[in-house]
Amino acid sequence: MPNNVEKMSTNYSPNFDLAKKGKKNIKYLIFHYTGMISDKSAISKLTNFNSKVSCHYYIDKNGKLIQLVPDLYNAWHAGKSYWRGDKILNNSSIGIEISNPGHEHGYKAFNKKQIKCLIKISKILIKKYKIKKQNILGHSDIAPLRKKDPGEKFPWKFLADKKIGVWHK
């Protein structure tokens, strides 16, 4: 494992459901961008009780990994969502937020350090929870009328080449 995953830090969010889900209930991995100008503002929002949003993992602009909600608790990242018959994907997914200003604040390509970290943590989670490659999704896949993230600059093909997700030609 690279240093950024080995040295994962924690900054727990109060925004999660107290009831635990079983390991076998985790079927999806959902990728997001923060849509925030800075890491500080994103972490502040994700850990603020009044925001009512969170994620399991956060990858900052330098590729550092931070856990905000333990895997077996429902983080509040998917909102009203739907995928192939499943609704409310917070109940069956792990959410990863990647620092990026998003479409509202000057959307950028994700950097190499972020993608390297994303690959490492994704492979760990895929193996641990036996997540199928067709169940690795973007927020825009599960909430297409509400969300654009992770967006058109997200390297889906590159990730699919690394056995993370599916690339449709």
Image (cartoon, rainbow, N blue to C red):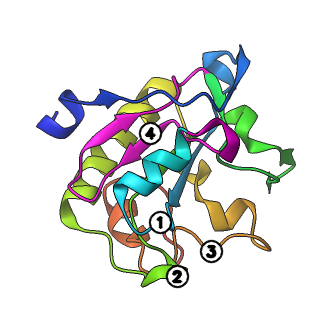
Is disc 2 in contact with disc 1, using a CB cutoff of under 8 Å? no
Is disc 3 in contact with disc 2, using a CB cutoff of under 8 Å? yes
**Which kind of residue does numbered mark 3 sit on?**
Lys
Q: At x 59% / y 53%, what residue is drawn?
A: 134
Residue 103's disc is: 2
- At which x and y percent is residue 168? 54, 74
For residue 123, above or below residue 45: above
**Secondary structure of the residue carrying numbered label 2:** helix
- Which is nearer the N-term, disc 4 or disc 3? 4
Categorize mark 1 by other alpha carbons within 10 Å: few (<14), some (14-19), many (20+). Answer: many
Q: In the drawing, does residue 136 fall left or right of residue 4? A: right
Hey, which quadrant is residue 89 in on the image? top right
Label 3, on which residue? 148
Categorize mark 3 by other alpha carbons within 10 Å: few (<14), some (14-19), many (20+). Answer: some
- Which is nearer the N-term, disc 1 or disc 4? 1
Q: Does residue 2 appear in the picture of this structure? A: no
Q: What is the distance, in whole Å, between disc 1 and disc 3 at their CAs?
A: 14 Å
- Which is nearer the N-term, disc 1 or disc 3? 1
- Which is nearer the N-term, disc 3 or disc 2? 2
Residue 36's disc is: 1
**Which kind of residue does numbered mark 2 sit on?**
His
Hey, which quadrant is residue 113 in on the image? bottom left
**Secondary structure of the residue carrying numbered label 3:** loop
Q: What is the distance, in whole Å, between disc 4 and disc 2 at their CAs?
A: 21 Å
Q: Is residue 52 magenta?
A: yes
**Secondary structure of the residue carrying numbered label 4:** strand
Q: Which residues are magenta?
A: 48-72
